[in-house]
Amino acid sequence: MIRVASGLRMVLAAFALAAFAFFLIGPLVNLALWSVAERWYTPYKLPVVYGTRYWEQVFRPTGDAMASLATSVWIAVLTVLVALALSIPAGYALARLKLPARAFFMVLFLLPQAFPSVAIYINVARVFYNIGINGTVFAVVLVHAAHGLVYSVWIAAAAFAAVDKDLELAARNIGASPLKAFFTVTLPLAAPGIIASGIFVFLESLDEFTGTFFVGVPQVTTLPLLLYNAAMGGNYQVASITALILLVPSVLFMLFIERFLRADVLAKVGA
Amino acid sequence: MQPETQARAGSGAAIGVRGLKVAYGGTRVLHGIDLDFTPGSFTALLGSSGCGKTTLLRSLSGFVPVEDGSIVVGGRDVAGLPPEKRGMAMVFQSYALWPHMTVLQNIGYGLKLRGKSRAEIAAKVGEMLSFLGLSGYEDRKVTALSGGQRQRVALGRALAIDPGILLLDEPLSNLDAKIRMVMRHEIRAIQQRLGLTAVHVTHDREEAMTMADRLVIMQAGHIAQVGTPEEVYDRPASAFVANFMGAENVLPLSIQRGEGQVSIATGDAHATLAGEAAAALPNGEALAYFRDDVASLDAHDAVAAGVDLVVPGTIAARAYPGGIYRYKVEAAGRQITVDDVARHELGTKVGLRIPLQRLHIFPATEAGIAA
């Protein structure tokens, strides 16, 4: 009886695992297949001719893909710098402030997420056009930073709130100025959370489509825009390869979170 | 601990607190505290939670803004100064050691801020660690230390900067009982050797009495009594202090002042008192506070002899904590705790023999606040 029950449980578990793997890995396998399919048409279930021609095309130094990858990374780095420059002081203030000021600022930072992004970006694009910065990297960085701040301020506030105030006071007590205490005690202790928020902003920027489309096109071409153009042009191979490249940083980020972020910081996100 | 650290006797600083008022969000926590700390003294701030003792300590250290009043250290009012400019070192209840630093970095932090060289810091920290019995622990992570070791590192970090004043915020409350006893003696010995002015906050009466030269009993943001441990224990200034210092038995008394003598009554029991002891007693309704070891059991019809009061009562409960029996006796409408070597059955009628000179008697109107 017990053996039958445990056998049944094994079968159910295996089935659940297979279903999970299908939903998670299925689309990825499809991407991987498309990236190496040189010829693939109906009614064939699998590519007819395999090859790395499109990989070579994408990674060719003169190719669009490398240029837009460079643009994407450059924009993402600048976005992280802008977002951290704002979210470190803002997160610290939010972590140490008392309600209701805390709630007010939190809502202020979350507000951009409350409206449909297209409606916002079309107005932003108009404003940027009027002041003449439309189609510049600077404009795209601004849009990405505004979007990333929502998360980075939130995560930074959680990271700072997880640092016991007594640790800071102990430094002040034996002679550290407020700034010195912040840079030697509070910031290093909050660093894993801050770095995580930076990576998150980086990924969000790398991934961002709508805002870039409205304020960057046609002068600024990032990887998602390239992917969009390739997919619209029916070039599924280039689209798949671009998508796979976009996936790499996300996976690295998950590994980092798993390895470095303490549970008590994660628990304070949104608290 | 090695005695090799040079004695710096008399390096403590004096603190004078005048009319100190502190409020949190509109709620007054300290109502005008006046207190002097002489150089090299060890003062314990004692009180139940919420009495303001921690707030007083934190306003000394500058962590809590002062609403009004002054804190004079070395002839200078520091009440408006930030924590880093006050020359006081604090040991926190949570130790507040920095988990991203080693023992060396923790203890050396204050020295580094003062521009000491790497070699000077290493030498000083090494000296501090051998002083604290932690030689060779420089490169340990503080997260890898036991509670007692963390406590020592926290103490070392505070002492490394040669402070004139050492503030101790319940530093022993997170340690287990055995290490706590050891640390009491160690902290006291270090304070004596270095001649520091120490201010220690605790809710543990025994800890305060064994460590400090002077107790400050606090009650609801006021000072209830200041005195040596003996003074506070034997001559409590108020019903609250008596109760807080362990006189938990309460007996209502009715006192009649007569010609040269005083008659005291409780329930059916009477006694008379004359002379000096009688002169200090209040007139009218009063409450007597006394410890568990004051009353003794006697026959229920025993005769009151001399200055004892014999109150008839009934045994209501019995416990055996070891060596003696502990009884709850119902007498004069109250439950009184009495220890006795003999075993008695519940419901037995007994007489409670209470020596009058060991009672702390306060007028009922005053005592009512604390009871």
Image: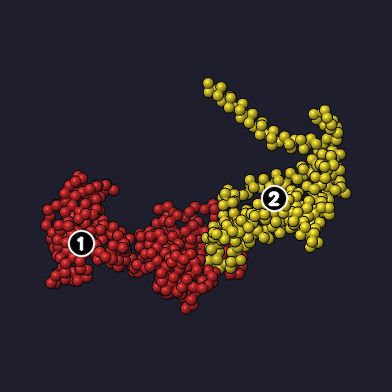
Q: Which mark is residue B253?
A: 1
In the rendered image of this protein, does residue A195 appear above or below residue B242? above
Q: Residue at x 26, y 65 (%)?
A: B365
Chain where mark 2 sits: A
Element carrying mark 2: loop
At label 1, counting other C-alpha atoms closer than 10 Å, the crowd grade (few under 14, some 14-19, many 20 or more) is many
Element carrying mark 1: strand
Q: Residue at x 18, y 59 (%)?
A: B266
**Camera-nearest residue between A194 and B24:** B24
Q: Is residue B274 left or right of residue B236?
A: left
On the image, the x and y values in percent for residue A23 come to 69, 35
- What colouring style does the render use? by chain
**Camera-nearest residue between A98 and B34:** A98
Chain B shown in which color?
A: red
Q: Name the amino acid type tagged 2.
A: Pro
Q: CA distance from mark 1 to mark 2?
A: 78 Å
Q: Residue at x 18, y 55 (%)?
A: B352
On the image, the x and y values in percent for residue B82 come to 54, 70
Is there one chain holding both mark 1 and mark 2? no
Chain A shown in which color?
A: yellow
**Quarter of the view holding residue B262:** bottom left
On the image, the x and y values in percent for residue B278 come to 18, 69
- Which residue is the site of mark 2? A116
On the image, the x and y values in percent for residue B308 come to 16, 61
Q: Is residue B91 left or right of residue A38?
A: left
Chain where mark 1 sits: B
**Quarter of the view holding residue B222:** bottom left
Q: Residue at x 61, y 68 (%)?
A: B117
**Camera-nearest residue between B125 and A103:** A103
